[in-house]
Image (cartoon, rainbow, N blue to C red):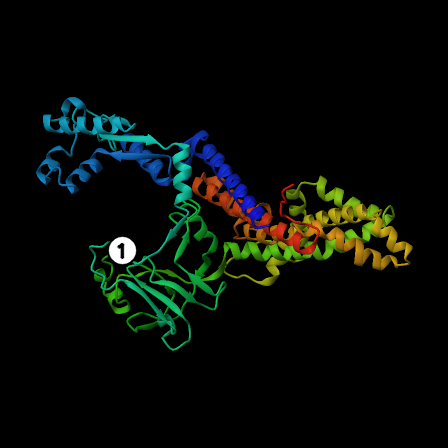
Amino acid sequence: MVKYFFKRLFRGLLSVIAVVAIIMLLVYGLMDRTLIFNMDENYAKLGNNTKIAYRYQKWDEYGYLTYVTYSSWLNSLLEAGEIDEDTYNAVATIGRTAEDDSEETAYYIQQFYDYYDSQGYKVVRLDAKMTTATKVANGGAARYFAYKNKSLVSRVVTYFTSLLSFDDIHYVDEDVDIGERGLTFTLYDPAYGGEKFAPAILGNGTQHKYLLYFSSEFPYIHQNFVTLTLGESYSVNTGVDVFKTMVQKQGSYVTSTVYYPTGYVEESADDVHTATYVEGSLALSTLYQERYTDDYTNVELSKSAMSKMAYSFICGIFASLLAYAIGLPLGVLMARKKDTWVDSLGNAYIVFMIAVPSLAYIFMFKAISGALGLPTTFTINNISAIMFVAPILSMAIGSIAGRMKWMRRYMVDQLNSDYVKFARACGTSESDIYIKHIFKNAAIPITHGIPGTILGALGGSIITERVYSIPGVGGMLVQAITYYDNSVIVGVALFYGIISIVAAILGDILMAVMDPRINYTTKAR
């Protein structure tokens, strides 16, 4: 069985890699890359050569290509000691055209060209844009740079090799004086004043100050040893990783009593547990010196609302519970009342839910909910339980039809089985036959979808969350597509792919537990 599941996992991972590669090909290779600037206000204000340079700079940041400017190349030579500052100052400014370059500048211009051309880069020179014979246009200064488009293979390899990052005591540069590197274990977390029993592991030389700590918030145990990186957003949540966007809290800032490393105490929204290293930051501010003892000064702020994933999970899991609690019994009833008005009515509901687009009945249910006085829009800073009612019911009504259909089908398939005929011949009551025999066997394939239903709730519902303005994971993908945020599109797709793999494997395990006849061990013949 272990061999089977490793094979299943391996095949699943290959499928995910293939899906991510296809999505990357679509968004980075086939779509017009200038579309990413549609929501960029800075881009619209620029003109001439500055606009072109900005475009390539952003394409480099967003993973389309590798972009190197002439000035950055000179800086690298200066840092390596290959040129001195006098040479740098003499050749850093290029002429309005190639003919205007000094002899020394022309030499380094050629060196730049020869090096990057040999590396497969395309070297571009943008002559100055002039308004008059002597005046350079706004944003029209001459530019010289090289770029190379990233191949699909290198992009996929880079993406998957950087998915996981591991924090260690050598994260901070070796030449920075930070004291003794190492990890410290304590039973009394100083972030709680040092009086509350709360085990924690603190680091020095690491990126994060707290590598392990406990809190009263789900999932209660938090770690920073390993960080999952799905890709940095550049419009949905600018500068923040996709996975972090899913799991970090939202809403307005909330204050509490904060105990800083120096012993200073105040009411603040600072979350000391999120402190990360910023070189030289302590010396920059007396405010930091009053609160911190080292350069672990970069902290996130506590917020009042749950994370996107939490909202999606709550809606999804309760909708699923309703679907199973209502759909399965109705499916059993339809099977028992086969070819009666009960069965016909149930089939009519199933056909209606299949035939009508989900968007239509969700909007219809939203209108009905609004007429009944139920909230139909989320307000993130004033969340109440009643806000979840309409979206949960909207998500459940479609799933109920699915559970009814499959439960009825599996039970009807079992009706003419030999064990059913034998049970009837032995005088077993119809209720016992349906509950103890038919339902038990018919429920086995149903159980395979339970892990997928639970894990799928983490991914949210794209349509329902958009309709009800739920600040969940489901709306991220639509928003990313709207804003051409490719990192989020790829990251969310990978997240859904991982969920699917884990759900399929857990479903196989659950079926094997439910039915001893299922054996995943392959025997040689």
Label 1, secondary structure: give it: loop
Residue ID at (12%, 37%) = 83
Q: Residue furthest left?
A: 86
The answer to whether residue 172 is above or below residue 152 is below
Point out the residue furthest to the front here.
525
Q: Taking 280 as reference, is 27 above or below it?
A: above
Query: In which quarter of the view is residue 112 placed?
Result: top left
- Is any atom of residue 234 visible in this view? no
Horizontal side of residue 3 vs 349, given as left or right? left
Residue 387: percent from left, percent from top: 60, 58
User: Does residue 4 appear left or right of residue 90 in this picture?
Assistant: right
Q: Nearer the viewer, residue 444 or 43?
A: 444
Viewer-closest of 363 and 391: 391
Q: Position of residue 22 (x, y in %)?
A: 49, 34
In the image, residue 490 sits, relative to residue 422, either above or below, namely above
**Which residue type carries mark 1?**
Val
Task: Determine the residue located farthest toward the bottom in the rendered image.
Answer: 195
Residue at 13% x, 29% y is 105
Horizontal placement of 59 versus 286: left or right? right
User: Looking at the figure, which quarter contains the C terminus?
Assistant: top right
Q: Residues within 10 Å of mark 1 (few under 14, many from 20)?
A: some
Q: Which residue is mark 1?
A: 172
Would you say 139 lies left or right of 446 here?
A: left
Q: How many marks?
A: 1
Residue 297 in view (yes/no): yes
- Residue 156 in percent (x, y) is at 42, 38
- Which residue is rendered at x = 32% and y = 63% of the image? 203
Q: In x, y percent, where is residue 201?
A: 37, 66
